[in-house]
Amino acid sequence: MKLKPQKFADYATIAFPAGMLTVFFVIPFGIMIAVSFFQRVQGAFYEPAFVFENYARFLTGFFGGILGFSIGLAALVAVVSVVLAFPFTYILTRMSRQAQVVWLVFLLSVLSLSEVLIGFGWSTLLSRTAGITNLLVSLGIMDKPMSLSPGFGAVMTGMVYQTFPYTVLVLYPALSRLDPSLVEAARTLGSGPVRSFANVVVPALRNSIVSTLIMVFVFALGCYLLPQLLGKPSHWTLSVLITDQAIYQSNMPFAAAMAVFLVLVSLSLVAISLLYGKKEHAA
Amino acid sequence: MDDMKKGISRRSVLAGIAGGSAVAMAGITGFPGILKAQEKSLKIGAYGGYFKDSFDKHIFPEFTKATGIAVESIAQPTGEAWLVQLEQAARAGQAPADVSMISQVSMLRGSAAGIWAKLDPAKMPNVANVIPAFINKYDDGSVCGVGAVTWYITLVSNSDVIGEAPTSWAELWKPEREGQLGLLALVTNSFLLDVTAKTYFGGQEILDTEEGILKVMDKLAELKDNVQLWYRDEAQFEQALKSGEIPMGQYYHDVAGLAAADGYPVRSTFPKEGGINDSGSWAVSKASEKLDLAHVFIDFMSQPEIQALLSRKVGTSPTIPRAKTGLTDAEFASVSSEIEPIIPRYDMYQQRADWLSQKWTELIVG
C-alpha cells in the first residue's frame, strides 16, 4: 500500500536528503559541466569561456577506444562479481545467524581497506619475487615463478576483489527475503538443488540481479587507482586519463569534459537497462 | 614498517590521496607551530614522506632556532598535483602553505597563471649565492622563485640481478632488457624525451620542432617492450627495484642512495650521457599573508651552511656553487656527478604542454 503525500509538510522528511544531494552532488556536477566549456590556457590553467574544443578533442578514435575498453572492463567486472557473489550470498543466507554475522563482518572489513592497500597488496601477491606463483612452484605445479602483474588478469582480480563485498551486501537483503517455500516446492516436484537454484531462485530475483549489475558497473567505471597500479598502460581506463589531465596536466576543462561524457554514457546505459527491465516486467 | 613509511614517497603520490591527507598529516605532525599559533609561524610545503621527514628532523628546527619563526610543515604531493591545489585554493583566497617547494615545469605553469607572489631579492642577501639559472622570474624580470635544491634522476639497477652497472642510457633499448624496466609514466616528470634526444640524436636541439619531437618519440617507442612498469608513484617502483622484480629503470639518485645505505642491492649510476638534473624552487603563494616571513625563510635556506646541510642530511645537490658549500669530494660525489647533466627542456614542456601530453599518452597507451 502506498500513501501519497497529501500536503506540503509531508515532503519535509525528504528535505534534508534533497538538500544534501543538491549541495554535494548537483552543485559540484553543475560546476564540472560549466568548467568543461571553459577555455584551456596551455602551459597555465584555464579561464571562463564557452567553447566546445574540450569535447572536440575527446571525440577521436583514440579516446573512443579507451572509453570502449573502460566500459567493457566495468561490465566484465560487474558480471564476474555477480556470478561469484550470487551463489555465495544464496548459500550465506541459508547459514546460521551466527555464521552470517561472521561473514558479513569479514566482508565489511574488506570494504574498509583502501584502494591503495588493495592495489599494493595484489601487486605483491602477483609478483614474481614474492607472489603466489612461488607457492605453485613449491607444490610442483609450476616450473618457475612468474610475474602476473601488471596485466589484465591483475586488474580484473583487484577490481573484482574490491567489488565483491559490495555485490554481496547489495544482494543480501533480496536473497534473505526470498520465500523458502519456492525452493521447497521445486524440490518437492523433483528438481535437484542446482536446477532449482538456476530455474527458480535466479529468475525470481532477476530484478535484483539487474540492479546489482548496474550498481557494480557504475562503481567499477569510476575506478582509477587499480587499473593504474595493476595494469599496463593499455589497461588504463578513462578515469586514469581524467586523473592525469586534472592532476598532472592541470587541464581541468578537458578532464571535466571527459568526466561529463563518462557520466552521460553510464547514465544512458543505466537508463537503457532500466527501460528494458520495465518492458520485461510489463510483458 | 620502515619500508611502508618510506613508501609514501616525496615527489609522487597516488593521485589525489596524499593531497587529501596533506591536511590531515599537517595536523598530526605535532610541530610547535600548533602550540605557538599566536607567535610567528610559517606553513611550509615539502614533498611528503622521507623528504619531509628529513626536513622536519634536520632543517626546520635549525630555522626556528635561528629566527624564532615556528614551522608548520605540510606534506605536499608531487609538483603538479600540488600546483593544482594551490591554484584552486588561491582562487578562493586560501593558501594551504605559505612557501612550497615547486618543480620547474610547475614553476613555469604557475608563473603563466600568475599564482606566485613577487619576491624582493633586496630582503634576501643570501640569495646572491644561488646560481642565476636557479632563480625563477616573471616575464617582467621580477623574481618569483628561488632554487631550493636540485636532484638527479639516474639509471638504477638491482645489483643482484644485473651483475655489471650499466654505463649508458642506451642500455634501456637493449633487447635483453625485455620486461625489466621501470620508467616514470608522465612526459613531464620522466624527461625521457631529453634522454632519448641526448643519447641518440646528438643533443636536445631536435626537440625544437614538432617533427623532431615525433622522431624522438618513434625512437622511444622502440623500448616499450622492455618496460614492465610505467610508474606514477615512486613507492611502486622502489619496492620492485629492491626486490629485483623490476631490476632496472630510472629513479631518483638520492632515494636510491638511501635504499643502498639501508642494505638493499640497489645502485644508482650516472650514465655517460649524464643524469637528468631537475630542481625545486621555493615559491610563495599569492594568497599567503606571510610574505615577510617567507623572505626570511628563503634567505635562510640560501646560506652556504644550510645548502651543505641539505646535501649531507637530505641527499640533494646544492643550488649554490660547490666551492661555497665546503662539501668534501666524497660528500659532493654522493649527491652529484662531474658528468655534464641533462637539463630538461622546460620551455618545451610548457609551450607544447597539451600536444605533448596527448602524443605521449598515445605513445605509451597505444
Image: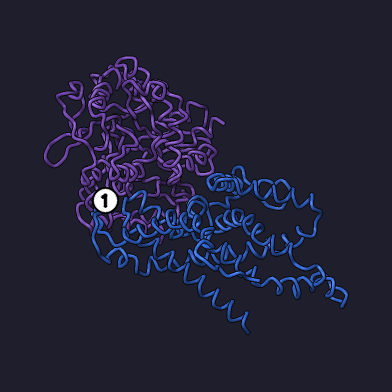
Chain colours: A blue, B purple
- How far from the left and from the top, in percent, is residue B134? 22, 33
Q: Which residue is mark 1?
A: A45
Q: Residue at x 30, y 20 (%)?
A: B306
- How far from the left and from the top, in percent, is residue A140? 73, 50
Q: Residue at x 72, y 60 (%)?
A: A89
Disc 1 secondary structure class:
loop
In the image, taking residue A112 as reference, residue A21 lies left or right, namely left
Viewer-proximal residue, B88 or B12? B88
Hey, which residue is sitting farthest top in the picture? B65
- Chain of the residue under the numbered disc 1 shown in the image: A
Q: Is residue B36 visible?
A: yes
Q: Is residue B329 visible?
A: no
Q: Residue at x 54, y 62 (%)?
A: A10
State the image quarter where residue A214 is shown: bottom right
Work out which quarter of the rendered image holds the N terminus of chain A and state it: bottom right
In the image, taking residue A45 as reference, residue B267 lies left or right, namely right
Q: Residue at x 48, y 58 (%)?
A: A18
Viewer-proximal residue, B122 or A233? B122
- How many numbered tags mark residues here? 1
Q: Residues within 10 Å of mark 1 (few under 14, many from 20)?
A: many
State the image quarter where residue B131 is shown: top left
Vertical comparison of A53 with B280: above or below: below
